[in-house]
Amino acid sequence: MKQIKNLKRGILLFLLALLIVWPFLFQSKYLLHILILIFIWSYVTTVWSYMGRFGLVSLGHGAFFGIGVYTTAILFNLHHVSPWLGMFVGGLVAAAIAVVLGYGCFKFGVIGHYFAIATLVLSEISTLVIIALRDALQTGGRLGLTIRSVGTSPLYLQFDNKMYFYFLALALLLLALFIWKKIDESKAQMALKAVGEDEEAALSLGIDVVKYKTAVFALSAFLTAVGGTVYVQFTMFADPTTCTGVGLSLGIVFKAIIGGMYTLWGPTIGSLLIVILEEYTRLFLGSAYVSYSHIIYGLLIIVLIRFLPKGLHGTVSEIFQGRRKREAKTLLAGRQLAENRD
Amino acid sequence: MLILNSVVNGVLFGGVLALMAFGMNLMFGVVQIVHLAYGQFIMVGLYLVYVLAILYHVPLLLSCAAATAAVALLSILAYYLVVKPLLKAPPINQLLALAGVWMVLENACLALFGATYKGVQVVLPVLHVGELYIAASNLIGFVVGLITLAMLYLFLNKTYTGVAIRAIAQDPEITGIMGVNPRTVYLVTFAVGGALAGITAACFVPVYSVHPHFGGAFTLLAFIIVILGGMGNLLGGFIGAFIIGVVTSVSSTLLNPEIGQIIVLLICLLIIIIRPQGLLGVRGK
Amino acid sequence: MLELNNVTKNFGGLCVLKNVSLRVEQGEFVGLIGPNGSGKTTLFNIISGSLQPDTGSISFLGEKVTGLTPNKICRLGIARTFQIPRPIKSMSVVENVMLGLLFGSRNSAPARREDMKQEALKYLDITGLRVDEWTMPEELTAAALRRLELARALATRPRLLLVDEFMSGLNTSEVFEASQVLKRIWQEMGITIIWIEHVMDSLMNLVERVVVLNYGELIAEGKPSEVSKDRRVIEVYLGEES
Ligand SMILES: Nc1ncnc2c1ncn2[C@@H]1O[C@H](COP(=O)(O)OP(=O)(O)O)[C@@H](O)[C@H]1O
Ligand SMILES: [Mg+2]
């Protein structure tokens, strides 16, 4: 057992070292680009899973991502505010919205698929807001906006050399994994796990259900918005379909489901697979065929939810470790509706 | 006058919306499922009409009928492949699987038809009634909507299956007592729901051109109407449709259309949180 | 310690509790009996904040607690067990008890995980449940799950404990053992208890005072010996049997 652990740690350290030296060894701009995308989406998906793994399925993370993207972009384009500050402001705005929506939902017992739908509505609102503000805040509406270029400038988080984004995105991903670990060690993890499985029992043990759920929602929203900022600084372009809205929200959730949201590496593996799938179809079939990759992963979702509700990595690691069934059996342990009747 | 005009057109449009929401509401009431891919079924219907009428020169009415039948079949297929295996799963799993269906249909249409708008050019007159201008397309939608709903009303009240559907919608645990097989009822419900999506699509033909991202907004619109009237409450949904029809029509005349939609969505959020039984609904059991 | 004033609760048209008033003093051991469906569990749900009364008020240690959420009430010192045990299935038995330790009281739990584990095992031991660190709730029998419920409630370090059916389905020797557990909690730990039970002899032997509910109404109250002679109580129970 201990040997396996050491082996695993060894492999991880080796991979990390490889990733760190990668941009110096290989010059391929294309591969670097793909890796950056993988890091960013893994980061966002991991951060989404902070909630998802406790049965809090948000279909609103597209909105939070978009808030990060557009807050940064607008502050910079219109007021020349550094994206470093924009990142922070965007995060706070996202967290504030999460607190208001989350507090309302959790206080009134909006859980499970009702919560999913409430957050879905938020996603749709975010798209409409961006379109509505096309002139007032120069979001460009459906056509999108371009970040004003100032060449390479660390202060304004713009780099001609993509290597900087590579390390930034990698650092973000590591941060997200680190926070996951921290949550696991904290008492919040126990609280959220209990709440995810049986809210009434959790309440009866003194767990402040509303507080913990709202807190993890706010944290997740904040970090998602930060991801949006880094993404837009990297691509220098934003439009409502790729940077916000229902489609993006579903994309994040699907990556988590495919990899498995209950394990540390599941979200990363899901994102890795999806990004590769998308890029593969784009590269070998042409960009007109990217929709085929989406068909494949839509189908994959339907099949996985039916047969492997814990996702690929979740299932594999369970088989490997043969450990006790510690996670909930369902994809998302919803509140048990067992009424306390005779 | 402008406002009166848009109120009238809103009411007329409400007829189609009522039809659309009815399908989703029925599926929620009977199968207890939120059909997240409902708007995509309407989109498929529109594409089918386009393919038949424009590419194969089938007469328009016949195309609409064929599309309706095809969407009903597609809905039955979705029931068997996606919904039925998950009937006992947590609702959130059902929701996400249907999100998968959304993704598949949307991208299949994108792959087949590209991202551009496709439509059947039907030139319909604008009628002058006194000082009002009424779009004939809205009028047709209104009439078709009401006729279909009337037929549904007869079906739900006069046939045995229909009565069983209604009974289950009111009390999901009643099937045992009624001696009906819930699976049969579910199947019929999905077929009817699909047919309604198809007829909605037919009514939309003169109004909208279709594109692959067309469905999402209509899933949400249907959903908002259902929420407004109270989920599973069929009469509430009917009234809700006209309210939404008028509100969207008036707000897009007065304000910019996005702001109108945002307001509607915010109200929808408030209802989900505070009155999940709907504004028009009475508190259930 | 606990005071209920004219508590009424309706479900739809059904009146489940009618003007129930009740006082429980510090250190008492009260039995709550009544036929099935008479509203006993509902009364617990209302005291613990899971349900809100339609009218009436509840105070605990002189403070009004009506309207507080269940978690706040738990932290004030009222713990409850569920009639149908509700363990967190994805956590081990010991972790379930740790939940009570971590969140159930204003006093902080031991900081080190090891100490917390020992503490949890101690509470499990009090209820007579011997398990190891890895036992999962799904491995437990129905009777053992009830003990877990009790241990978890105790771990919140309550001053008032609401026990909902601890003994149904046990054999004679197990019933005796179970009553010893409750007795110890009451006498040695000094916790006030309200106890719902259908196993009448055992309850009558143990408690100081009995409260009888019938169709949501409090029909009798007093020492076990008095209550068992009460005409209305006998009618209710005979009526149930016939
Ligand atoms: N959540 C609820 N909704 C509707 N009726 C309920 C609910 N909980 C309990 N009841 C009804 O209230 C009555 C009293 O139930 P309960 O308090 O569980 O009785 P007891 O515990 O004394 O057997 C029963 O008729 C039961 O059906
Ligand atoms: Mg009971």
Image (tube, rainbow, N blue to C red):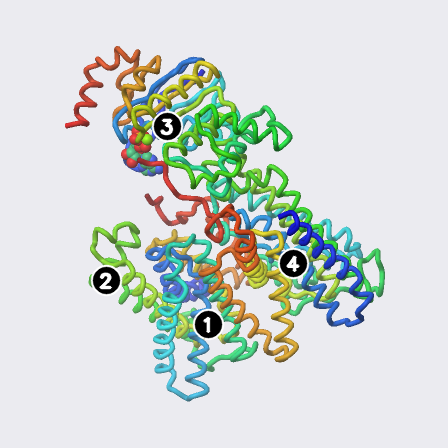
Name the residue that disc number 1 marks: B43
Q: Is mark 1 within 8 Å of ligand 1?
A: no
Mark 1 chain = B
What is the residue that sits farthest to the bottom in this orientation? B57
Secondary structure under tag 1 reads: helix
- In three-dimensional space, the C-alpha distance between marks 4 and 1, rounded to whole angstroms, equals 32 Å
Q: Which mark is residue A42?
A: 4
Question: Which amino acid, by three-letter code, is at mark 3?
Answer: Asp
Mark 3 chain = C
Give whichever of discs 2 and 1 has the lower sequence position: 1
Are the residues flagged by discs 4 and 2 from a single subunit?
no
- In three-dimensional space, the C-alpha distance between marks 3 and 1, rounded to whole angstroms, equals 55 Å
In the image, ligand 1 is in what quadrant?
A: top left
Question: Label 2: few (<14), some or many (≥20) within 10 Å?
Answer: some
Question: Label 1: few (<14), some or many (≥20) within 10 Å?
Answer: many
Q: Which mark is residue C164?
A: 3
Q: Nearer the viewer, mark 4 or mark 1?
A: 4
Say which of C71 and A276 sits in front.
A276
Secondary structure under tag 3 reads: strand
Are the residues flagged by discs 3 and 1 from a single subunit?
no
